[in-house]
Amino acid sequence: MTGFLNLWWPQLGLTELERRTFRRHLTAVLFEGAYQGSIVMAAYVLRKGLNASDFQVALLFSLQMAIFMFSSLVASYITRDNHRTFILLTGLFGRLSLVTVLFLPESYFIIGILTWVSLNHSIFIPSLNVMFRLNYRKETRGVCYARAQMAMLAISSTTAFLVGKVLNWRADLFPLVFAAAGIFGCATYLTYVTVPRPVHPLGKFIRPKRPPYHDFFSVLKNDRFFRWYEGNFFLYGIAFMITFAMVPIFVNDIIQADWSQASRMFGTIHPLVMILFLPIYGRLLDRTSVVPVASIAFFCLSFWPLILSMASTLNAAYAAYFFMGLGMAGVDVAWMLGAHTFADPDRIQVYSAIHVTLVGIRALFAPFLGLFIKRNFGFSAAFGIAAGLLILASVLMFVLGRRCERERCGGRIDE
């Protein structure tokens, strides 16, 4: 039992910089949790509240993620010295724009605003990774990230539960929910701007003089381990987007959940499960690398669409979301911190941006692939194919892990 507790909540010898960073990090994720819990019902608002079509729901997920392709375009200009400026601008001009839903609560306008928010978020992620790289050491980064995410998920699940209750009471209040999300989301970014600067930053971040997408093609061509890793993540991403785009339609049309029931699925059950397992995945990352974390996470996540492919009741859908939480706890760690396993100290933002850019590429077709399968073969086929892709991604990631044990995997100098 003691060994498990040490794994789940290990004692950390944080430096003064890490302690100060973590306090700001924790404050930021509390706002982030309120944002996530407020916005988690967006697709269900479109489907249930605004009678959006299957195409509009798929379009929402596609555009939100496809816009991430711009990450590599901007990341070339993110440095040690200016990353706070990018975080500030994306906060003020990104999420805060959700307040405008108060004035035009219409399906296509909401899709457009959420796409704009995603564009700004795609710039924010590489900026934040620079901060994590500079302020946390390798042996503490995973655990600190996991602990902060636990706090975020606790607030997120509580907020989502309350949002479901509010919308069950008066569904027409959804514009206020979007506006509140925008304010909370902006506060997240503004808090990250106040994270302390290291006196002797790790890595030498210099502004590259190459075209922005040069790094995208160059890294994928020359770093075969990272290319393999991203290929496996691409399979996961296709499966995730197929499932995620179909779930609001499935829950509304087949399960026929009310607002409170839907909020439990989309925003309460899986965050609470993630809280239990995030520290374990974070500790595993600190002790090994992102590869075994991703392999285990993909396998656990495969039960999410697999159960949905056979589900016809609310309780079965709840069970599926337990496994979503079990898998997404590991995916969250691997998705956000994967670049730190492969990239040299001065290339974190480049590798992170490549990872985010590939999200945008698969978003161009994956939600519509799910829609095509659903229309021609049904929900069960769409969810079943997604489960198969996740299992395949898990196996291939396991093979990559074995190869990485025998050879030097990635850049890998992480002082």
Image (cartoon, rainbow, N blue to C red):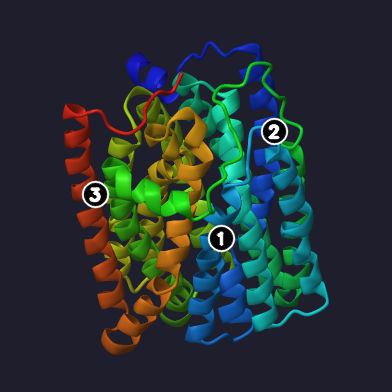
Element under disc 2: loop
Q: Position of residue 7 (x, y in %)?
A: 38, 22
> Between disc 2 and disc 1, whose residue precedes?
1
Horizontal relation, residue 266 to residue 113: left or right = left
Residue bearing mark 3: 394
Residue positioned 65% across, 82% down in the render:
108
Element under disc 3: helix
> Between disc 3 and disc 2, whose residue precedes?
2
| Label 1 packing within 10 angstroms: few (<14), some (14-19), many (20+) | many
Residue positioned 77% across, 73% down in the render:
101
> Between disc 3 and disc 1, whose residue precedes?
1
Q: Where is residue 226 in the image (x, y as percent from the top left)?
A: 32, 43
Q: Which residue lies furthest to the front in this view?
A: 209
Which numbered circle lies on residue 320?
none
Quadrant where the image shows the N terminus: top left
Q: Which of marks 3 and 2 is in front?
A: 2
Kindly identify the amino acid type of the residue bearing the numbered disc 1.
Phe
| Residue 149 visible to an observer of this rendering | yes
| Label 3 packing within 10 angstroms: few (<14), some (14-19), many (20+) | many
Label 2 – label 1 distance at C-alpha: 21 Å
Element under disc 1: helix
Instruction: State the residue in front, 277 or 204.
Output: 204
Label 3 – label 2 distance at C-alpha: 38 Å
Residue positioned 66% across, 75% down in the render:
112
Residue bearing mark 2: 81
Residue positioned 27% across, 57% down in the render:
390
Instruction: State the residue in front, 364 or 214.
Output: 214
| Residue 310 visible to an observer of this rendering | no
Residue bearing mark 1: 70
The quadrant holding residue 130 is: top right
Instruction: State the residue in front, 46 or 241.
Output: 241
